Structure formats: C-alpha cells, structure tokens
C-alpha cells in the first residue's frame, strides 16, 4: 500500500484531525524521504490520538544516505507522550527543540523536533534522529534549516518526481535567496575539485568560475528541474530545487550526481548490443541460405521420400532462424514464444499444407518470455509438433485448427499444443517410437529444457483431436550463465 494512503488511513482511524489537516500531512509526506536523506537521520511524524496523553507514529522514513543500526519500523505504533518529552513540549508550544535520546543499548543521538501548524494549532510534530557525532558535518545547521523550509514549501504540494530520495554519492549544494552558496557537501566539493574549483562556499551558483567548464547541457522537457551537463570530462545530472515563498526565492537546493561511469557503461552496452544484433542477423541470413540450398536439392531429387525429408529439415532450420530474426530486431536476449509460434505456423502453412487446405490458429494464455538459449529449443519443439500435426491430424480434410494454450503456476510454464484432428490411433503409446520428430521433441524437452512431454487424445474423446502437453521449469538458464 502507498505510504501516503497509510498515513491518511492511520490519521482517520486514530486521531481527531480534520480531512483538510490530514490532506496537508499527506502533501507534506511526499518530501519526507528526501528530507530524511538530506539530514542523514530518521524522520518520524507524530500526531495526537483521540486518547489523551498518547501519540501515534503516523509515518517514518529511513535515510538512504547513511546506515543507522537498530531502527525498527514503528509506523502505526502508539506511545505515551511521556516517552517523547521533546515531542510533547513541541506539541505544547509549537517551538522547535533539540536534545539527546537513547538510541541503542545506551548510545545517545541527537533529536530535533519541529511543529507542523494549522493556524495557531500544532497538528503534528516531525522529529529527526541524527547521529551527529558520527556525521561531523561542518555547517550541518544549513541542512536542518533546509529541511524545515522544504516542509513548509510542501504544504502547498510539490512534484514528487523532483523530490526523489538521495543516494550516498549525491553532492548537495545549498544557496541563500541570492544564489550564494552557503553549504557544499563533500561529494559536491569533490566534483568541482576535478573541475579546478577549490572552494564552493561563498561563490554565487551561476558564477562564470563555476560554469566555464560546461561544454554540453541537456534539459529534459518533462523534467524541467533536471539537467544533464558535460563538464571537464564529467557527465553530471544536476537537480535544481528552488524554494520560493510568495514568488521570492528563500533557498535553493542543488543535487549533483556524477554519472560519468554509468554513461560510459551504457555506451559500451549499446555497442555490444548492436554487434550481437548484427551477429544474429547474419546467422539468420546464413540459415535461410542453407534452407534455400536444400530447397534446390529437393526440387532436383526424383524421390518423394527425399523431398519429404528435405522439407522437414528445411522447416527445422527455418524455425531456428525465426529465433535469430527476433533477436536481430531487438536488444533483449529474451524471446516471446507466442510470437515465435506465429512465425512457425506461417512457415508450416506455407511449406507443409496443400494449397487447398485452410489452417486456423489459436493462442491463449499469458505471454511466455524465455531466454534465447531456451527459446531456440522451444522453437524446434513447436516446429516438430506443428509439422507432426500437419502430416497426420487432418488427413482427408479441407481445414483444421492448431492452437497453443499457455498456463503457469509458481514454478512451471505449461504449453498445450492442440489440434482438432483425427486423434491418436489406438494403442499409440505401445507402438515403437520411430518418429524422428517426436524423438527430437522428447530429447529437447526432457534433456535440454528439464521439462516433461506427453502426447494424448483430448479428454472428450479421440474425435476431438490431440494434445501435446509440455511443462517447463521457470528457472531456465540464461545464455550468459555459460
């Protein structure tokens, strides 16, 4: 369930807050994770319950920017007000407080409390629990002041995507209302040190000295608060978050993320993907060339048996080429089996069916996506089963239906390739297994894919056709596993 919805339902069930006051807290909660990261501490939101002297932890956020031990999730817990004296005092007079509290086995940490007002009434208290001694951040009060300003700014709503959580390596810069830098985190200083800027504090954010290294700037139209900059060999994502009240800038928070290595890896992956796609394209062309050569050979052969054997070989080769064709057209190494099946149906209908025979196809169930290594085997299996159905199921008929039904459970995929043909002959299971196609199917399913295979008549009777039932474990190997 969404955190904001949890907050609203907790307040409705346990407090006397009005709907407008609850909505105010929900709007402000959109910035809670960002604020928790900014102050490097736990954020708690306390509200008074209907029962006198008791408080409710209506929301809690864990920082992504620092690891804190012994921090259970207390959202929804009721406590006595006496257990949180700083929170109780802030509820009483609305004034912010700072103190110490026991955190874990006698360890003391700093606690800061701030009231959330609706007019003259304090409707909630936000507290930050911060391990200040371990942080040792010069100018930490700028982070706290900014957090309080963000809470006030969020009263009127904000764009949640602009206030997404921070990461431990994000650089933070804070300016005053004139864009003069009052705080610069160590990661922000590290980035600008690479650009030859020794100190950020006291500079104006848009000074020539800070912007002279920019050689490329990209502004996302759907994310106007974010820019991608190329500066001095670095690629930086800059998030600009101005805090304006009444149209006047009070503070600006700038988040810098060095994505140089990420972009280099993305480029490398794109190049490799293009090379792999080209290889799949060439493999597909080579397989189709082999199939064309076999067709020429089949036309020259006077033997009907040779022609039939070559036709089956051509279909097997083309069923593999279908997989490589899909892989040459997409960056992913995964294959949609239903799409492959449609291509195999088309091949079988073109190469195996009589010109006066009409084949209908059906597909049911969820999309089945497999790694390409497995998809090649599945394509071969489906090709053999379709060929088998085309050869034996519709004897003496002008039309027929072949379908693929896919189902699943927690551990397996189930493929049911069915037809509405004449069904299996009597004592089919007792006959010697001489069909090369069915031997290929059984070997691939049981040996290569680790599944099971059985061929049987429809439960309603032989006249309703045949079912080839395949089960495949979902835990299939990827090509990269080798």
Image (cartoon, rainbow, N blue to C red):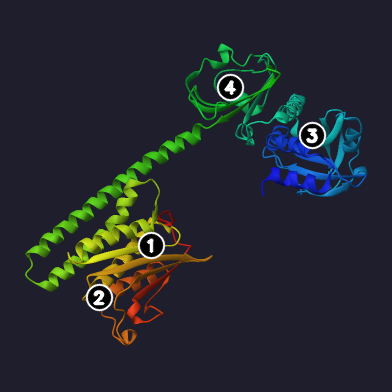
Q: Which residue is mark 1?
A: 363
Q: Which residue is mark 2?
A: 392
- Indicate the position of residue 428 as horizontal and vertical percent values: 31, 84
| Mark 1 surroundings within 10 Å by alpha-carbon count, few (fewer than 14), some (14 through 19), many (20 or more) | some
How many marks are shown on the rendered structure?
4
Label 1 and label 3: CA atoms lie apart by: 64 Å
Q: Is residue 435 left or right of residue 264?
A: left
| Mark 4 surroundings within 10 Å by alpha-carbon count, few (fewer than 14), some (14 through 19), many (20 or more) | some
- Asked if marks 1 and 3 touch (Cβ < 8 Å), the reply is no
For numbered disc 1, what is the local secondary structure? strand
Q: Residue at x 30, y 45 (%)?
A: 278
Residue with the most extreme top position = 208
Label 1 and label 4: CA atoms lie apart by: 58 Å
Mark 1 or 4, closer to the camera: 1
For numbered disc 4, what is the local secondary structure? helix
Q: Which residue is mark 4?
A: 192
Q: Is residue 272 visible?
A: yes
For numbered disc 2, what is the local secondary structure? helix
Upstream in sequence: badge 1 or badge 3: 3
Q: Which residue is mark 3?
A: 133
Label 2 and label 1: CA atoms lie apart by: 21 Å
- Quarter of the picture containing the C terminus is bottom left
- Indicate the position of residue 146 as horizontal and vertical percent values: 73, 26
- Indicate the position of residue 174 as horizontal and vertical percent values: 68, 22
Q: Residue at x 26, y 59 (%)?
A: 346
């Amino acid at each position: 369930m969404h955190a904001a919805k949890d907050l609203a339902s907790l307040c409705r069930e346990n407090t006397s807050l009005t709907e407008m006051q609850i909505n105010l807290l929900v709007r402000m909660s959109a910035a809670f994770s960002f604020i928790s990261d900014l102050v490097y501490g736990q954020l708690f939101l306390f509200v008074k319950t209907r029962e006198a002297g008791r408080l409710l932890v209506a929301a809690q956020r864990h920082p992504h920017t620092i690891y804190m031990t012994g921090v259970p999730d207390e959202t929804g817990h009721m406590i006595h007000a006496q257990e949180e004296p700083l929170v109780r005092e802030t509820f009483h007079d609305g004034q912010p407080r700072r103190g110490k509290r026991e955190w874990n086995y006698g360890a003391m940490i700093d606690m800061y409390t701030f009231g959330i007002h609706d007019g003259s009434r304090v409707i909630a208290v936000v507290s930050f629990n911060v391990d200040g001694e371990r942080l040792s951040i010069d100018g930490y009060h700028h982070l706290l002041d900014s957090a309080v300003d963000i809470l006030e700014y969020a009263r009127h709503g904000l764009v949640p995507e602009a206030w997404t959580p921070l990461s431990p390596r994000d650089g933070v810069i804070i300016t005053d209302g004139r864009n003069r830098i009052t705080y610069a985190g160590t990661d922000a200083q590290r980035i600008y040190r690479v650009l030859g800027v020794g100190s950020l504090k006291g500079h104006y954010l848009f000074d020539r000295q800070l912007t002279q290294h920019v050689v490329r700037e990209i502004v996302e139209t759907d994310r106007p608060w974010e820019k991608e900059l190329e500066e001095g060999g670095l690629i930086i994502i800059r998030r600009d978050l101005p805090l304006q009240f009444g149209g006047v800038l009070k503070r600006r928070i700038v988040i810098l993320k060095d994505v140089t290595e990420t972009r280099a890896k993305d480029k490398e992956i794109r190049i490799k993907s293009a090379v792999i796609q080209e290889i799949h394209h060439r493999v597909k062309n080579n397989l189709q060339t082999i199939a064309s050569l076999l067709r020429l050979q089949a036309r020259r052969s006077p033997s009907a048996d040779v022609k039939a054997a070559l036709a089956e070989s051509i279909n097997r080769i083309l069923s593999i080429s279908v997989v490589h064709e899909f892989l040459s057209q997409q960056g992913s190494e995964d294959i949609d089996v239903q799409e492959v099946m449609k291509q195999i149906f088309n091949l079988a209908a073109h190469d195996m069916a009589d010109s006066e025979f009409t084949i209908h196809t059906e597909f049911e169930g969820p999309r089945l996506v497999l790694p390409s290594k497995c998809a090649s085997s599945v394509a071969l299996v489906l090709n053999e089963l379709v060929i088998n159905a085309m050869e034996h199921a519709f004897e003496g008929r002008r039309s027929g239906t072949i379908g693929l039904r896919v189902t699943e459970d927690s551990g397996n995929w189930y493929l049911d390739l069915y037809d509405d043909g004449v069904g299996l002959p009597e004592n089919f299971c007792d006959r010697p297994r001489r069909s090369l196609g069915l031997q290929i199917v059984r070997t691939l399913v049981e040996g290569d894919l680790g599944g099971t295979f059985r061929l049987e008549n429809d439960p309603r009777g032989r006249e309703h056709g045949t079912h080839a039932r395949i089960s495949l474990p979902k835990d299939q190997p990827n090509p990269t596993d080798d």
